[in-house]
Image (spheres, rainbow, N blue to C red):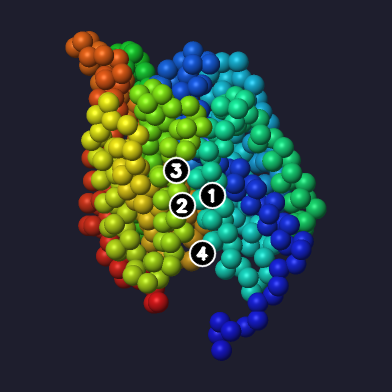
């Protein structure tokens, strides 16, 4: 009978290889969250402010997200093992340079270049998991990757807090070098090389990647500088014009790029998949805003150290990880529609709960909002990915997953830029009105999070109107 065939045991070499690849997954996932609790310390050490320090998160995330789809194609063309080694080398070298950066500009540049390495590593590692596992055990690949990724995300704030308090935030970055070297050595010894799968039709949509990157970076830079220069400043207008022209050029390039397009025509015509991407774009400001502003609130209003802020993140990260794990079995039992609706509703509700406590409220007042938002993130992203990927032909599964992740990172980066612009403008307005600095900051963060909650509500409408029906029809039998 199908499904009863004997499963091959995992040999010692296979287990060691999986551990090495797991280290790589942990490395990339951990780097999205580990520095979040250190950002207030970075502000002080490098004499900068929150509008600039947000780029420590955004520079890495944006480069990673935009490049992940072409990086996956490069891994397939030139060999996943080769792509992994190149990506790990780039990641480790620029992580080290970022760790010793004397100023915030070089730190941000290092983080951006780390994103290139992370983008090369991620799809290569996903493919290597399937290469390493025997055919009868390949169903383990997805849960292993998602599980280690969740652990890396959840452990990041704690590791960042411990290293920042015990030594310096720089060690969060410097520690990546020995971990990357260890992962590469074990992979070299335990994962056999395989040739890439190249054909005459293999092309990378470099023009599409370039125009999309220019458009997003111009928009983020305009949002970043608008509070200092003013929205009517010719430089801001010019940046917004560059954004519009670049995104229009991207759309035109994609129409003529054929099979090599970053977003192929058949994918762009799939209503369910496009709706899923739009929902992800709208929802993703939530996750990024919490990563940046929860530690800011804990440090600046509650006097938390970096380690205490990492521990304070546990209600969010732990609940996020638990529901991320549970979403797979729950999807099989109740279908994607219910999970999407619950997850989509939890995101704006969690943000609104975070805005209810006043400046004088203690940390316990934040726990309900952090937990509800964590539940929303855990349920929404895993389920929307499943629904979006299954809306396309199975041959498009890797591309679909990459595009959804690109939307998550792009939406989060732009959303965080918008949130920070609102926070800084609101804080200045409150201070000009005679409000104390700490109270002005508290009110400004609340305003920014409420805007993110409004975006998430629009995302919920998209889920209800366009994605929910497809999720219900895609329900798997128990």
- Residue holding disc 4: 395
Residue 447 horizontal side relative to residue 150, left or right? left
Residue 321: give its label.
2
Q: Determine the secondary structure under disc 4.
A: helix
Labels in figure, total: 4
Real-space Cα distance between discs 4 and 3?
38 Å
In front of the other: 90 or 437: 437
Q: Determine the secondary structure under disc 1.
A: helix
Q: Is residue 57 above or below residue 263?
A: above
Residue 289 horizontal side relative to residue 156, left or right? left
Real-space Cα distance between discs 2 and 4?
29 Å
Which callout, 4 or 3, points to the residue nearer the camera? 3
Mark earlier in primary sequence (1, 2): 1
Mark earlier in primary sequence (1, 4): 1
- Residue holding disc 3: 314
Real-space Cα distance between discs 1 and 4?
29 Å
In front of the other: 322 or 4: 322
């Amino acid at each position: 009978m199908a499904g009863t065939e004997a499963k091959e045991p995992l040999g010692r070499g296979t287990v060691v290889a999986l551990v090495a690849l797991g280290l790589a997954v942990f490395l990339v996932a951990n780097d999205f969250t580990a520095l979040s609790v250190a950002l207030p310390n970075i502000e002080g050490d490098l004499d900068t402010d929150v509008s600039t320090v947000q780029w420590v998160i955004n520079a890495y995330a944006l480069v990673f997200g935009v490049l992940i789809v072409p990086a996956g194609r490069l891994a397939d063309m030139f060999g996943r093992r080769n792509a992994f080694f190149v990506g790990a080398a780039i990641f480790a070298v620029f992580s080290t340079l970022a760790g010793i950066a004397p100023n915030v500009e070089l730190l941000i540049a290092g983080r951006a270049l780390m994103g290139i390495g992370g983008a090369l590593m991620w799809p290569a590692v996903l493919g290597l998991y399937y290469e390493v596992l025997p055919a009868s055990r390949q169903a383990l690949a997805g849960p292993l990757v998602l599980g280690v990724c969740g652990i890396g995300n959840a452990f990041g704030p704690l590791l960042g807090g411990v290293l920042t308090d015990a030594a310096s935030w720089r060690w969060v970055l410097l520690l990546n070098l020995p971990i990357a070297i260890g992962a590469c050595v074990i992979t070299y010894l335990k994962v056999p090389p395989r040739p890439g799968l190249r054909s005459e039709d293999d092309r990378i949509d470099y023009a599409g990647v370039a125009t999309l990157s220019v458009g997003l970076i111009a928009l983020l830079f305009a949002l970043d500088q608008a509070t200092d220069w003013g929205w009517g400043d010719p430089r801001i207008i010019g940046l917004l014009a560059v954004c519009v022209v670049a995104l229009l050029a991207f759309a035109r390039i994609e129409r003529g790029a054929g099979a090599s397009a970053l977003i192929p025509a058949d994918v762009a015509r799939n209503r369910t998949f496009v709706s899923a991407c739009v929902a992800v774009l709208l929802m993703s400001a939530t996750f990024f805003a919490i990563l940046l502003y929860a530690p800011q609130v804990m440090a600046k209003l509650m006097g938390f150290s970096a380690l205490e802020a990492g521990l304070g993140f546990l209600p969010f990260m732990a609940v996020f990880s638990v529901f991320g794990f549970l979403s797979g079995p729950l999807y099989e039992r109740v279908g994607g529609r219910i999970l999407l609706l619950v997850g989509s509703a939890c995101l704006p509700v969690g943000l609104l709960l975070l805005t209810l406590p006043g400046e004088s409220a203690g940390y316990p007042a934040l726990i309900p909002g952090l937990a509800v938002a964590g539940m929303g993130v855990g349920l929404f992203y895993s389920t929307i990915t499943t629904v979006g990927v299954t809306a396309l032909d199975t041959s498009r599964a890797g591309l679909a997953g990459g595009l959804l992740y690109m939307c998550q990172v792009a939406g989060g980066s732009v959303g965080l830029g918008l949130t920070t612009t609102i926070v800084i403008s609101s804080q200045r307005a409150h201070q000009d009105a005679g409000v104390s600095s700490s109270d002005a900051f508290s009110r400004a963060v609340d305003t920014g999070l409420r805007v993110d909650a409004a975006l998430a509500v629009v995302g919920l409408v998209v889920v209800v109107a366009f994605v929910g029906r497809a999720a219900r029809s895609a329900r798997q039998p128990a």
